[in-house]
Image: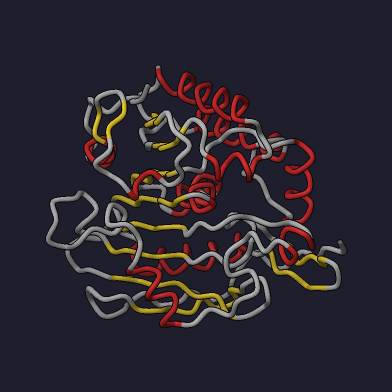
Amino acid sequence: DAPTTPPTDAGPAASFETPLDTWTYVAIPGGECANGSQYGVAVNRTDRSDRVVVFFQGGGACYDQITCYLLGIATHITDTLTASGVEGEAAAVPGTFFPPRSSTSPFAQATYVYLPYCTGDVHFGNNIADHGGRETHHVGARNVGGVIAALQAGFGAADRVWVTGASAGGYGAMVNWFRFRDAFPTARVDVLDDSGPPVDIEQGRWDAMMAAWGVMPPAGCPLCLDGVSEVIAFYQRTVTDGDRFALIQSTNDDTIRGYTGLTAAELEAGVLAVAASFASTTNFHTYVVDSAEHVLLRNPGRTSGGVVLSDWVDDFATDAATWANAGP
């Protein structure tokens, strides 16, 4: 690879002053997909509150010619997004993240922002790489920066921001948490991560990802480049103001095993270690299911340890004092 570093600033802020209660595509100035084409998001705005739910789309990750183009394991890696396609994907997101406005969900009165995934870098790269002669824009971090700028311009008065995602989007929510916290210092900024566990990836694979993506760690966390466990450890040391982090995860998630290069036993041990490290805290908790399933909020009525998943999410979002680790 012959990487180059693009600017982190996506450009002037887009306007999220979109029609109310309908999905509307908004191009992000300076935002790009892996093939260099325009990046944009879908916004479903409400005037019911200044609160915001941001959802990161998942869909694999890639870091070289084989993973990006021969195996094609990252969604939209060769695609040019369309307005109708992005709006359609947003409308199809499970209702736990974007519930109907008429529901009693704590998220129902918020503006919804859907971030499609087309950079192969779990929404966190800042690099243009050459993968076998194909220029690949791993610029998820720049795209997120453009979204944050638009949110600051339109929702600077927000008192709550929920940063959510599933699979690679769960990782995207986690690794970008510090950026949303920095952008909204007076708001509660909580993360709901479905199936993006902070369990260390096989080292050779991780090193290849970091090199291809040009990841920039949070200030004060150089060790965050050493493994994803260091990212969550950094948050546990520094998030002391009550912002919440919720991880929903299967012990033997087949998809995550493939992504991390870990055995079933290694992944299970890693997930249970995360749960143990969260158990004694008040603002970091896990909902663990003993299964190989991936993206558990597709079935919000499931139970684990006698706790219904949708109830656990509601407790997370409503600051319930009873919110705690749940699982086998």
Residue at 52% over, 33% down = 252
Q: Position of residue 81 (x, y in %)?
A: 53, 78
Q: Position of residue 256 (x, y in %)?
A: 57, 42
Residue at 45% over, 41% down = 293
Quarter of image, res 42: bottom left
For the N terminus, the image quarter is: bottom right
Name the side, left or right, on which 266 lies relative to 303: right
Rendered view: 140 above or below 276: below
Name the side, left or right, on which 53 lies relative to 293: left
Residue at 59% over, 55% down = 60
Number of dots carrying numbers: 0
Rendered view: 228 above or below 149: above
Q: Position of residue 107 (x, y in %)?
A: 24, 53
Looking at this view, is 58 or 7 the one in front?
58
Q: Position of residue 194 (x, y in %)?
A: 43, 44
Residue at 41% over, 48% down = 185
Rendered view: 22 above or below 241: below
Which colour scheme appears in the figure?
Answer: secondary structure
Name the side, left or right, on which 141 lies relative to 318: right
For the C terminus, the image quarter is: top left
